[in-house]
Amino acid sequence: MKRLVKWLLLGVLSLAVLLVIAALVLPAVVDPNDHKERIEQELLKASGREVKLNGPIDLTVFPWVGIELADVQVANEPGFAGDYFLKVGRAAARVRLLPLLGGDVQVGEVTLYSPDVNLEIDAAGNSNWQSLVSASAEGQGADSSESSDAQLAVAGIEIAQGQVSYRDAQSGTRAVLSDLNLETGPINASDPLEAEIGFELKMDDSDLSSRFYSRLEGEGVLGGAAMKLAVAEFEWSGQAGDLPFSLKSEGAMAYDGGPGELTVERLVAAVGDLELSARVSGSNMNADPQLSGRIEIPETSPRRWLEQSGIDLGFTNPEALTLLSASLDLQYRNDQAELKDLNIRLDRSTISGQAKLTSVSDLRGEFEVAMDTLDLDLYATADAGASEGSEESNLAELDFGNFNGAVRLGELKVGGVVINDVSVQVKTDAEGVDLDPVTASIYGGSMNTSVRLRPRQADRRVMLAHRMTGVQAGPLFSDLLGKPVMTGQGRMSAEVSLDNPTGDNPLATANGSVSLNFDEGQILGVDIFGIAGQAMALLGGGQTESEGEEEEGTRFSSMSLAADIRDGVLQTRQLDLASPVLKLGGDLRVNLADFSIAGTVEPVLLDGVDAERLGRFKSLVGVPIPVDLGGSLDAPSVGVDPAKLLLASQKQKLDEKKDRAKRKLLKSLLGDDDDDG
């Protein structure tokens, strides 16, 4: 900061010195306007650039040596696009003659009217001002021993209606600083410097237009003592696209370069309706900065802010992202940072926590976060279909740092399922992220899960190992599917990996295995005796409906399913159901990409356990009833396949005839023959 301020002031003062030198030389040649070429040659030697004095030259000699130039133009660096580096409508400077003879340089007010500066960086990174800076440094080095005893004082600097254009061919940045006005008080080595500056800034590449104003006081800006700055007013405001923004001070802002102390009582940044305030204090800023402060976001609506920004995240619930407030305290020292008393309100959630970075540069540290509730269903979005170009993941480019932390949630709702007492242990490193273990209470049971994220791998970027025990199936499936499906108590395990978790359909890249086991329950909405009635009708045995009251479902004593997942398709390798009246097997395929189901299950009615209940279905005992399943998983179509049923019934009859023939043959061989045969 000090170097920048000093460079700017020295640049203006260097121009003033050139004017003073010209004023001292000009009286000797009587009319300076008759010797413009000679003056331009001297300025060329001093600056290394061609200088054109297009306007008249006016000068005074006593008691002030003064010079005023009009329409001055300094040539651009060769090879750059602009026609000039600097144009000045009018420039004037004065210096007292008698003190100057004694080595005391007392400069009056230096004024520049309508200066126009053209700054450029070419594609190779070269600037059109570097040669001027180098020439100025060489000149100062050569004259430093001669001027060390001289005292310099300037009554003030005034720049009016200035403009600075900046073009960077490397980054494509184009900016114009216009209506530049700078006014200072006296400048000397002992008194504080008061300055007031304002300008307009427009950046073409970011659609930014703004106005800057500041009033400040400084000491030591010309060297000598340590620099001190005190900002009385500071405001930068404007428009970024469709959003207004502002950055302003609401309190003292000061920097003392001696001990390196920084004070910012309150700095407020606002973009649209989103506001952030910061309070910062710092020490030892010159060597080993130590910072502490507080950041606050007052209550606002992120949804409204996003709408102002032209961003639509597609949330279907109008309550999503309607409330946000936040606050936290921070400290920084020796490449270490600490965040304390984090408090966030986001819609229905309250978040608290703290973090400590033992190495900011390496992103290494620890954290703890607690949340009372998180309803992810609140942030559900409309299904806008697959978008092109989303198959490639940029997760591999992220730096996950080296963190160890814990996240705790009182209640988590996702996909209609409610999970309580969630605890997540988090570990990150260069390879990715581990969530292990993730424990929770879920529908009367418990859950233990581990998730590994490895974005740099070609496949298996997400690996999940999941275990649930003692889960009540009734409320679980009711919340998950929105209607009663089954009851019972069960357990579940899964080992699943995803190759592309950020693609349009992550489950289409799933591979692994899953198993389910439930005891003492009921499959709701599946009337096995109704299905048996359909089978009887297809075999010519009566009506399609079962006699008497329909069953509400099919009870079972145990049910188990084991399946493999290959490229997003789940294929059963075991499907068994046992109940007092039937057993069931089958073969199913579930496409996880669209949750469609296809396959056949084969319930078989049992004899002897509940014979009275079987009634007219006794003829179906032992006959596999092929039931085709199709459609969607949450509302499958169910129907008896007549061709398969006929084959199954005929096969049973043939098996019965074979059994009778075997028994008859066995009796004959044993000599147990009779007349009835």
Image (tube, rainbow, N blue to C red):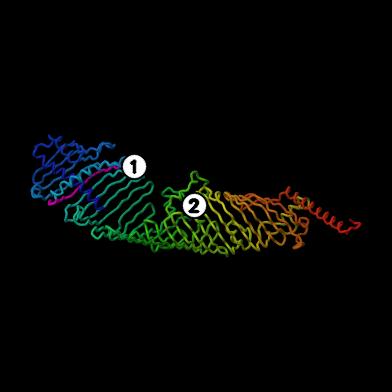
Which residue is more in the foreground, 274 or 125? Answer: 125
Residue 486 location (% of width, % of height): 63, 59
Amino acid beneath label 1: Gln
Residue bearing the label numbered 2: 315
Q: CA distance from mark 2 to mark 1?
A: 39 Å
For label 2, the SS is: loop
Mark 2 in CB contact with mark 1 (< 8 angstroms)? no
Residue type at tag 2: Phe
> Where 471 sits versus 53, above or below?
below
Which circle's residue, 2 or 1, is located before the other in the chain?
1
Q: Is residue 656 depicted above or below 176 in this figure?
A: below
Q: Which residue is mark 1?
A: 170
Number of the front mark, 2 or 1 = 1
Dominant SS type (magenta):
strand
Q: Quadrant of residue 300?
A: bottom left
Residue density around tag 1, few if under 14, some if 14–19, many if 20 or more, within 10 Å = few
Comparing 63 with 16, the one in front is 16
Quarter of the C terminus within the rendering: bottom right
| Residue 307 in the image, given as x and y percentages of width and height | 43, 50
Q: Residues within 10 Å of mark 2 (few under 14, many from 20)?
A: some
Instruction: Answer with the quarter of the image where residue 662 lies.
Output: bottom right
Q: Which residues are magenta?
A: 148-172
Can residue 673 be found in the magenta stretch? no
Q: Position of residue 669 (x, y in %)?
A: 86, 57
Residue 163, quarter of the rendered image: top left
